[in-house]
């Protein structure tokens, strides 16, 4: 039996396209796609009856029918950090980061579309996730990475069978190279920024919290923000769960102060973010100077009554060390939210609200590495 896949729609100009024939971006404005998909809020949602994977939320996912690709992703635990703040351990995912949530969706989409090869761009975690899930789906995968990417990360991509293309320059240079390759016939661009199926994977982060808390959400969800894929996925889930009568939380985004276009735009009351200089920071995973979905991110945060803040590297370093002393070994980017809402923080945006923060990536195997 053949099942139709939800199509793409551009939030900027309402251009629409069939997912089977569409280009990787909107042909009219070059912007990222959204998905023409809203789950039926009256449909039964009983995740405990589903598989031990992201697909336990199948009724709210845009992948009807068939047996999907999976590595048993999702269902990561919540552990308390304080009486009011819990951490969700997404670094326990199959490839050690939250990117598995979106990667499995794009791998399943690519499997159904049947391209000759899949291309992606990444500076680390997303590339490893795409390589692993493409291997699981028996898809040829090519990952474009910026020069200087850790050999341990690229080594894991190659171990999964992916071809790794090292691109001179930074993160944006790798993205441009991947997009050029994506325009060739028979290529599927597994973009965690431009393809909205990725966001519908990351939204399961919030559905898991809802399930774990017995059908409710905390008063705030605090997430690190670079390209904003976790925050926008969270916003999707919050809206969908609100239709089921769940009280929506505030969305609080956290950026590294060295590269904080969204925090600066939020503070200025702007509807969009201006590109900023690409400066060094420990939180490389969220150091995005010009996020393509900036307007959507800012709108989602304001609609929720939340905020976007930034933290300096010295607090990132201290927060990561504090988590390690609590038995939680994470990469620097994953410590950003704890740096922002730590009880000793002089400017925490949380106040007295209950919250969940994600620990979204495992620490390097070398404990001295930052």
Image: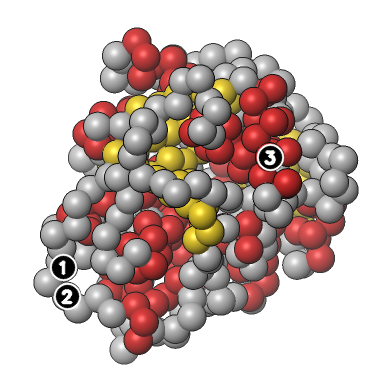
Which residue lies at the image location 85% right of the left edge and 46% below the top edge? 367
Q: Pointer 2: what residue?
A: 43
**Number of marks in the rendered image:** 3
Report the residue at 39% width, 61% height from top. Answer: 209
Q: Is residue 327 visible?
A: yes
Of the numbered discs 3 and 2, the one sitting upstream in the chain is 2
Front residue of 262/174: it is 262
Q: CA distance from mark 1 to mark 3?
A: 42 Å
> Which of the 4 image quarters holds residue 179?
top right
The quarter of the image holding the C terminus is top right
> Which of the two marks, 1 or 3, is nearer to us in this view?
3
Residue corresponding to mark 3:
322
Depth order, front residue of 182/340? 340
Query: Image point 78% across, 30% down: which residue?
Result: 168
Between disc 3 and disc 2, the foreground one is 3
Q: Tell me where residue 295 sits by quadrant.
A: top left
- CB of mark 2 within 8 Å of CB of mark 1? yes
- Return the x and y of residue 139 as percentages of the image width and height: 63, 70
Q: For the point 63% across and 63% down, which residue is it?
A: 92
Residue 204, quarter of picture: bottom left
Q: Which residue is mark 1?
A: 40
């Amino acid at each position: 039996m053949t099942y139709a896949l939800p199509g793409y729609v551009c939030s900027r100009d309402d251009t629409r396209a069939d997912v089977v024939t569409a280009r990787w971006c909107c042909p009219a404005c070059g912007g990222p796609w959204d998905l023409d998909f809203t789950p039926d809020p009256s449909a039964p949602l009983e995740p405990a009856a589903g598989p031990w994977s992201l697909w336990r939320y199948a009724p709210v996912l845009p992948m009807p029918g068939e047996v999907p690709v999976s590595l048993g992703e999702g269902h990561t635990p919540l552990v308390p950090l304080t009486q009011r703040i819990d951490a969700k351990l997404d670094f326990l995912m199959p490839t050690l980061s939250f990117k598995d949530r979106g990667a499995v969706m794009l791998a399943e989409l690519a499997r159904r579309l049947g391209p000759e090869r899949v291309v992606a761009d990444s500076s680390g975690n997303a590339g490893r996730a795409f390589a692993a899930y493409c291997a699981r789906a028996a898809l040829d995968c090519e990952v474009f990475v910026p020069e200087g990417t850790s050999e341990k990360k690229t080594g894991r991509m190659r171990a999964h069978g992916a071809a790794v293309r090292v691109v001179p320059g930074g993160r944006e240079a790798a993205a441009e190279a991947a997009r050029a390759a994506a325009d060739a016939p028979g290529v599927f661009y597994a973009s965690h920024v431009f393809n909205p199926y990725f966001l519908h994977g990351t939204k399961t982060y919030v559905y898991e919290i809802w399930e774990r808390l017995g059908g409710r959400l905390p008063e705030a969800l605090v997430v690190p923000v670079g390209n904003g894929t976790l925050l926008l996925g969270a916003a999707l889930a919050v809206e969908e769960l609100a239709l089921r009568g769940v009280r929506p939380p505030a969305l609080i985004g956290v950026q590294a102060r060295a590269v904080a276009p969204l925090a600066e735009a939020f503070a200025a009351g702007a509807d969009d973010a201006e590109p900023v200089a690409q400066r060094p920071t420990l939180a490389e995973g969220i150091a995005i100077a010009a996020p393509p979905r900036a307007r959507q991110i800012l709108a989602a945060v304001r609609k929720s009554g939340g905020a976007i803040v930034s933290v300096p590297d010295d607090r990132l370093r201290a927060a990561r060390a504090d988590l390690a002393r609590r038995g939680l070994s994470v990469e620097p980017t994953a410590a950003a939210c704890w740096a922002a809402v730590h009880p000793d923080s002089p400017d925490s945006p949380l106040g007295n609200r209950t919250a969940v923060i994600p620990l979204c990536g495992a620490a390097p195997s070398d404990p001295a590495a930052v």
